[in-house]
Amino acid sequence: MPFQVGDRILTGRNEYGSAVLAYLQLAQRTGAEVVVVPNDESGQIDVAALADLIDERTKLIGLTWVPTAGGLVNPAAEVGRLARAADVLYLLDATQAVGQFPIDVSTVGCDMLTGTGRKFLRGPRGTGFLYAGPRALDRLDPFVAEIRSATWDGGRSFTWADGARRLETWENSYVNVVGLGAAVRQALDIGLDPIGRRSAALGARLRTGLAEIDGVTVHDLGRERCAIVTARVAGVPTAEVADALARRAINVSTTIAEHNQFDTEVRDVHPLVRLSPHYYNTEAEIDQAIDAVAAVAGHHR
Ligand SMILES: Cc1ncc(COP(=O)(O)O)c(C=O)c1O
């Protein structure tokens, strides 16, 4: 996107580190400004504050639908309505959303949506995709002209390819693209509605179970929550909790303060243990995970 001095990117407090780093680099290069929209009292993006911040300087709203660390599902469609009304481009990071629950870009009202293969879609690592709608295609300046993204008309002129293909490159890891396609097809065959219901229910069971353990606190944000559950055990370093779970063949991850600087500015909770069940997990496995965390908490006491 072309940016000029004084243009603004409005973004959320719970963005992914790489997205923020890209905005900061852009700000350094162009003189654009990165403005963090506060969260409301529930921990989701404050939609009223966003509405107040949008003005003629705003060129992009960049939001993470489901942040890496916090259980939160941001109100992506409410943000989409504001972006439409103000005619501002809206980039939605759906990396942790795609494959976890149904997604419809027309309902959400985003102009660009990014997804990855390697998370809830259960596809190959190193794959991902971008949706770019008509408003985006009108305004984006594609990064590189080459034989897939453009046609050499002859002599000294070229024409961008139609649609989002102008953002693609000729060469790809086709074996991975086939793998990504298989993952997408499997998710669609199983159905994103049942997948969404089941993963949210397993997340809620886990969240409730963990919150009931003495010495364990759950740190998920927002009104609507998903299958990502974050917690800590009082007095036990998070890395030790993760190791103890790994010894019981329960694979978890941990959040990293430096990757969540905007969040860290307002709540000093990281690192947290991050558990993310999916539809194929059983209720018994969720209960085993709760018992395992309880054992770590109990062991400490
Ligand atoms: C919210 C969010 N956006 C983007 C990414 C980056 O995903 P990838 O490295 O697969 O592109 C992640 C990965 O953790 C993420 O959680």
Image (cartoon, rainbow, N blue to C red):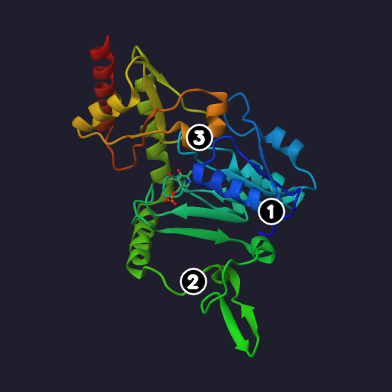
Q: Report which quarter residue 188 is drawn in.
A: bottom left
Residue positioned 20% across, 35% down in the render: 249
**Count of picture labels:** 3
* Residue found farthest to the top: 301
Answer with left or right where residue 271 lies relative to residue 291: right
Q: Which residue is mark 2?
A: 169
Q: Position of residue 295 (x, y in %)?
A: 24, 18
Vertical order, 177 against 49 (above or below):
below
- The CA distance from mark 2 to mark 3 is 31 Å
Q: Amino acid at mark 1?
A: Thr
Vertical order, 158 against 197 (above or below):
below
**Rendered-image quadrant of the C terminus:** top left
Q: Amino acid at mark 3?
A: Asn
Answer with left or right where residue 279 lies relative to residue 89: left
- The answer to whether the residue labelled 2 contacts the one labelled 3, judged by CB atoms less than 8 Å apart, is no
Residue positioned 26% across, 19% down in the render: 296
**Rendered-image quadrant of the N terminus:** bottom right
Q: Which residue is mark 1?
A: 30
* SS type, badge 3: helix
| Comes first in the chain, label 1 or label 3 | 1
Q: Position of residue 16 (x, y in %)?
A: 50, 42
Is the C-beta of the residue carrying label 3 under 8 Å from the nearest atom of ligand 1?
A: no
The residue nearer to you, when weighing 207 against 268, is 268
Residue positioned 34% across, 64% down in the render: 176
Is the C-beta of the residue carrying label 2 under 8 Å from the nearest atom of ligand 1?
A: no
Q: Report which quarter residue 144 is drawn in.
A: bottom right
Q: Which residue is mark 3?
A: 260
